[in-house]
Image: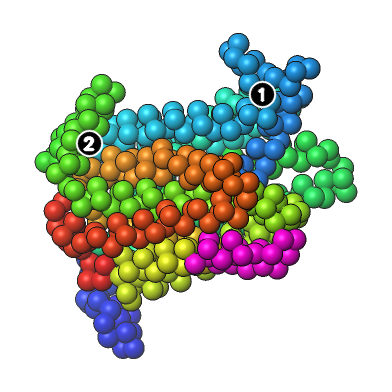
Amino acid sequence: MGTVAPDTPDAPRVPEGGAEPEELTTLRERRREQRGWYFYDWANSVFSTSVLTVFLGPYLTEVTKAAAGADGYVHPLGIPVRAGSFFPYAVSASVLLSVLVMPLAAAFADRTGRKKPLLGAAAYLGAGATTGMYFLDGDRYLLGGVLLVVANVSFAVSIVLYHAFLPQIAPPEERDAVSSRGWAFGYGSGALVLVANLGLFLGHESLGVTESTAVRICLSSAGVWWAVFTIVPLLRLRERPAVAGAPGGAGRATFGQGFRQLAGTLRQLRRYPLTLLFLLAYLLYNDGIQTVITQASVYGSEGLGLDQTTLIGAILLVQVLAVAGALLLGGLAARYGAKRTILGSLAAWTATVGAGYFLPRENPVWFYALAVGIGLVLGGSQALSRSLFSHLVPAGKEAEYFALYEISDRGTSWLGPLLFGLVYQLTGDYRNAILSLVVFFALGFALLLRVPVRRAAAAVGNVAPGRI
């Protein structure tokens, strides 16, 4: 009764009396914590998919137009703003504010060792703001702007803290697989909720609700989903004390100390030039990825003459295939190493974006083929970048370094759209605009190729896994 079955010779043996060996107990605890960690991706991904990507932009723009004067302007804080510009301005404001808040929250978390309470506070503040979008009707555009800023900043802070748990819940040899499963959970959740939301939106008349009410239900349901499933990681993740010997030290923290510690982190980063080189590579190729995500629908509608149904179908296809893509690239990383797999994914991104230049107009089949290519490399390239960076972070500074990682993501996400817009303005051709994004993948590939990951990991005091 107390022994391991004979067909599992490599499993730890259980001694007489039924007590489990310490290594088996530790493994089970780690697996339980990892499964809880996956659920935060499951919880928050519906915000970025259903709220930011699909529903909030068009709806908040219509609410703003309803509040605008005869000249088409609204006046938040007395500032004249064209109604169609209010949503992108609100998104920009939230990104700028998150760039200021993320490092502060991260420094506070590392110094006190209290990542989980801060994760919970950020998650529930964001979920509450998103749920409150149900009341966004009539001409309440200011309410919509405030809720968007609060939700998006809270989302950004929670993601930093969520990423910072990865080095603590997975040893080096497991991180690629764990990170890939987390991304797969997130894309699966986003696709599932988006299907349900689109069903409600497209069938609102048969359900006896107005289109406005359907959209508000879709928005608020994302907040409820976020709040409910955040319970799982908060129950399963374990808090670790701050590392006493880490820069900044363990102990009490004030916001002033948080800013000083952030400045120290930036100074310290100069001592790790290989970590900085990876961040520069990530800045470039991730900006290309984010720009493809945000501008693909513009290219599809304006450049290729495709209708909204086709574009929504392509978004769903990307979400579904990103689940398989994240797991597929995670498997390839286990065999060939994360760096080689990311480099391969960047080559695939280059080929996919380059192929987009040649797509025929008004032909949904080829646009869906492009969506297939994007979906297969999207989740994996992001997941493996996260796990690879986790090897380049000094112990006890996880949250602060992942704040810099997220700043590389969010704080520079205007570069790709700027290039896209400039090329279109100069040439008047969306094909040239989409092709211009190849430069981000090519430069990111070249920089990443120059990062010796083992030396970079050793420089911060970490041991890289067998395959990297």
Q: First in sequence: mark 2 or mark 1?
A: 1
- Extreme-top residue of the structure: 78
Secondary structure beneath label 1:
strand
Query: How far across and how far down the image is residue 289, in percent?
Result: 48, 53
**Region in magenta:** 351-373
Q: Residue drawn 29% across and 23% down? A: 255
Disc number for residue 266: 2
Disc number for residue 335: none
Q: Residue drawn 24% across and 59% down? A: 451
Quarter where residue 4 is shown: bottom left
Residue type highlighted by circle 1:
Arg
Q: How is the image coloured?
A: rainbow
Q: Residue drawn 87% across and 45% down? A: 205
**Label 1: how many Cα within 10 Å (few below 14, some 14–19, many 20+):** some
Image quarter where the C terminus lies is: bottom left
The answer to whether one can see residue 3 in this image is no
Q: Taking 399 as reference, is 22 left or right?
A: left
Residue type highlighted by circle 2:
Leu
> Within the magenta stretch, is there residue 356?
yes
Secondary structure beneath label 2:
helix
Q: Main secondary structure of the magenta part?
A: helix
Query: How far across and how far down the image is residue 425, in percent?
Result: 59, 41
Disc number for residue 82: 1
Give yes or no for contact between labels 2 and 1 (Cβ–Cβ under 8 Å). no
Q: Residue drawn 74% across and 31% down? A: 62
Numbered disc in front, either 2 or 1: 1
User: Which residue is at the front of the view, 215 or 95?
Assistant: 95
